[in-house]
Amino acid sequence: MAAAVTAAVSFPSSKSSSLPTRTSLISPERITLKKVPLYYREASAGGRVVSIRAQVTTTEAAPAAKVVKHSKKQEEGVVVNKFKPKNPYTGRVLLNTKITGDDAPGETWHMVFSTEGEMPYREGQSVGVIPDGIDPKNGKPHKLRLYSIASSALGDFGDSKTVSLCVKRLVYTNDKGEIVKGVCSNFLCDLKPGSEVTMTGPVGKEMLMPKDPNATVIMLATGTGIAPFRSFLWKMFFEKHEDYKFEGLAWLFLGVPTSSSLLYKEEFEKMKEKAPENFRLDFAVSREQANEQGEKMYIQTRMAQYAEELWELLKKDNTYVYMCGLKGMEKGIDDIMVSLAAKEGIDWLDYKKQLKKAEQWNVEVY
């Protein structure tokens, strides 16, 4: 609490002139005043006794205005954690199909679950899945696993009553030479139509789409990290909305090991045919493609071919980068941008922090 003191000093002699002085330490327009009683005190001034009258007024600073964050993303009305592990939602499998070729290194499945409109979500959010069964390590039910949603808010059937996932079946050999199967991924990939599945969510705001329909949206995905971008792109190019019509640039980079691992390839090619001026599509197939130096074509290798163009886009305040997939790709992209930024006297890592703060650099990696 601040205090403003207003004091009047007067000399009692008739020959002396009255010399009132007032000092205000805080502007009255910005404070609330609370008066307290007057106080008198005698003091010596120039050999004479004077009476000092002082009124102390305490002040209370006006409460600071609450800072309201205005997000650049489509956050209005977004639902988070409607269903939790203690009160989950039970969905039903409508469709479950493998979307990788037989010779692909691993299986990836696209699955659609009914929600009956009870689990409203947005493009870029995730849902939790609790696999059936008991964890043999602790004798308790399995914990939930989060999966990025692969469908737009309207769902694959366009009625807002389904949610879709893109799941890779996890199978690997451990240090002991034993074959290990991922609990939840195998549970999901083995589901048959009509089966029930326990779900939670939706969750997450990091990967929500930008509001600006004229934005440049750069999407970087490896493998099943394509899921949120399929949801973006369906809304942008396959659907009609009264309050949203995408007229910006959507640029997708998808990295996979083999061409038989390319996910949703036909869908994306149809989008490109439909909107060639608004959609760019670049694949990076590491085991089949190489750059001019003979290096394997990873997603960052493909991006390096457009490095200067990407850097120019990143300097605009309506460019948004979204990254989903393997953790290692972010470092590869940093390596590309560091030298380009340095040419202009810019520290890339500092600049990336500014992009994050402005919601223009969004990462969901694992």
Image (cartoon, rainbow, N blue to C red):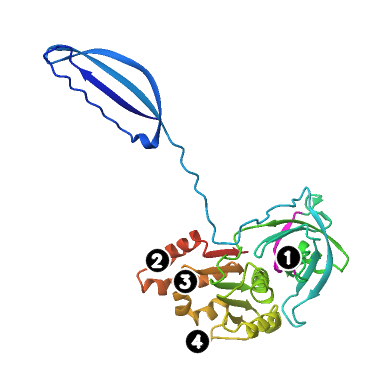
Give whichever of discs 1 and 3 has the lower sequence position: 1
- Residue 354 or 238: which is nearer the viewer? 238
Marks 1 and 2, how far apart at CA: 45 Å
- According to the image, label 3 marks what residue? 314
Q: Is residue 334 visible?
A: yes
Q: For label 2, count other residues whose C-alpha is less than 10 Å away and answer few (under 14), some (14-19) or many (20+).
A: some
Name the image quarter holding the C terminus. Answer: bottom right
Q: Considering only vertical position in the picture, is 102 above or below 37?
A: below
Name the image quarter holding the N terminus. Answer: top left
273 with respect to 157 (left or right)? left
* Circle 4: residue type: Gln
- According to the image, label 1 marks what residue? 176
- Residue 296 or 243: which is nearer the viewer? 243
* Picture quadrant of residue 197: bottom right
* Circle 2: residue type: Asp
Location of residue 346 in the rendering, given as x and y in whole percent from the top left corner? 38, 68
- According to the image, label 2 marks what residue? 347
Give whichever of discs 4 and 1 has the lower sequence position: 1
For the stretch drawn in magenta, the main secondary structure is: loop
28 with respect to 221 (left or right)? left
Marks 2 and 3, how far apart at CA: 14 Å
Location of residue 150 in the rendering, given as x and y in whole percent from the top left corner? 70, 69
Circle 1: element type: loop
Marks 4 and 2, how far apart at CA: 27 Å
Q: What span is in magenta? A: 143-155
Q: Considering only vertical position in the picture, is 25 above or below 265?
A: above
- According to the image, label 4 marks what residue? 293
* Circle 3: residue type: Leu
